[in-house]
Image (cartoon, rainbow, N blue to C red):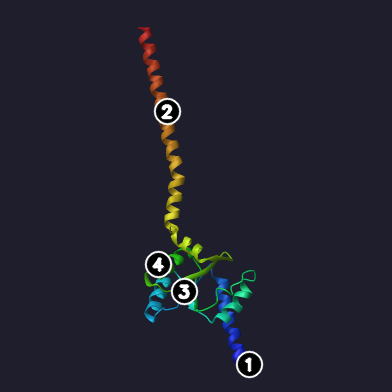
């Protein structure tokens, strides 16, 4: 009975991780050395993310409780690790993608975003997106640009109106003399 209770607790812990995080990335950690493991965990920690390795059977049980509409049986085959974050998943996808590219290990299998299963290609597309600060800067520029153009246009109109009125005044004064 002790073993069964221990497994229940482990499934509960995995379930909590799945429930509490906005995005999950499933990776194949074949060939990941201890040094690489420390390196990737440190990089992820800088972005408030983590990498954990669970037994596939326990992770699959937890996933069935949390993601009842998603079949993850294909994902939890072979060496599988889970990268998770409570914050921005795009930054985490960038870290995992770059690490995978540089080391040749930690290959992306799939991910979950907004309770939807996404394939490795979609995780790579997430990794190629600009970071949050860049997107916010671009949005601010896009919002600011039309306002500046309108201000310049209105300033030009009033300047042109003043010049026309001055010309009319000068013409009238000329005609009086």
Outermost residue on the top side: it is: 177
**Residue at image location 55% in from the left, 75% down from the top:** 17
Residue on which the image places disc 4: 98
Element type where label 1 sits in the image: loop
**What percent of the width, then of the height, locates residue 48?**
45, 70
Q: Earlier in the sequence, mark 2 or mark 3?
A: 3
CA distance for labels 2 and 3: 59 Å
Q: Earlier in the sequence, mark 3 or mark 1?
A: 1
Which callout, 3 or 4, points to the residue nearer the camera? 4
Residue on which the image places disc 3: 50
Which callout, 4 or 2, points to the residue nearer the camera? 4
- Answer whether residue 88 is visible to the viewer in this image: no
Quarter of the figure that contains the C terminus: top left
Q: Are marks 1 and 2 in contact (CB under 8 Å)?
A: no
In the picture provided, is 112 more to the left or to the right than 163? right
**Residue at image location 40% in from the left, 16% down from the top:** 168
**Residue at image location 40% in from the left, 70% down from the top:** 99
Which callout, 1 or 4, points to the residue nearer the camera? 4
Residue on which the image places disc 2: 158
CA distance for labels 1 and 2: 86 Å
């Amino acid at each position: 009975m002790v073993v069964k209770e221990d497994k229940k607790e482990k499934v509960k812990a995995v379930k909590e991780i799945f429930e509490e995080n906005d995005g999950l990335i499933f990776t194949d950690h074949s060939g990941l050395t201890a040094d690489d493991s420390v390196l990737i965990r440190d990089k992820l920690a800088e972005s408030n993310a983590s990498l954990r390795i669970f037994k596939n059977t326990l992770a699959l049980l937890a996933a069935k409780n949390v993601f009842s509409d998603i079949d993850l049986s294909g994902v939890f085959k072979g060496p599988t690790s889970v990268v998770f974050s409570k914050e921005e998943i795009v930054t985490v996808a960038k870290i995992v993608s770059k690490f995978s590219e540089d080391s040749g290990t930690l290959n992306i299998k799939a991910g979950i975003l907004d309770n939807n299963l996404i394939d490795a290609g979609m995780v790579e597309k997430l990794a190629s997106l600009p970071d949050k600060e860049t997107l916010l800067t671009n949005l601010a520029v896009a919002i600011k640009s039309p306002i500046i153009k309108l201000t310049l246009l209105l300033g030009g109109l009033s300047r042109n109106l003043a010049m026309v009125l001055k010309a009319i005044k000068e013409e009238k004064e000329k005609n009086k003399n």
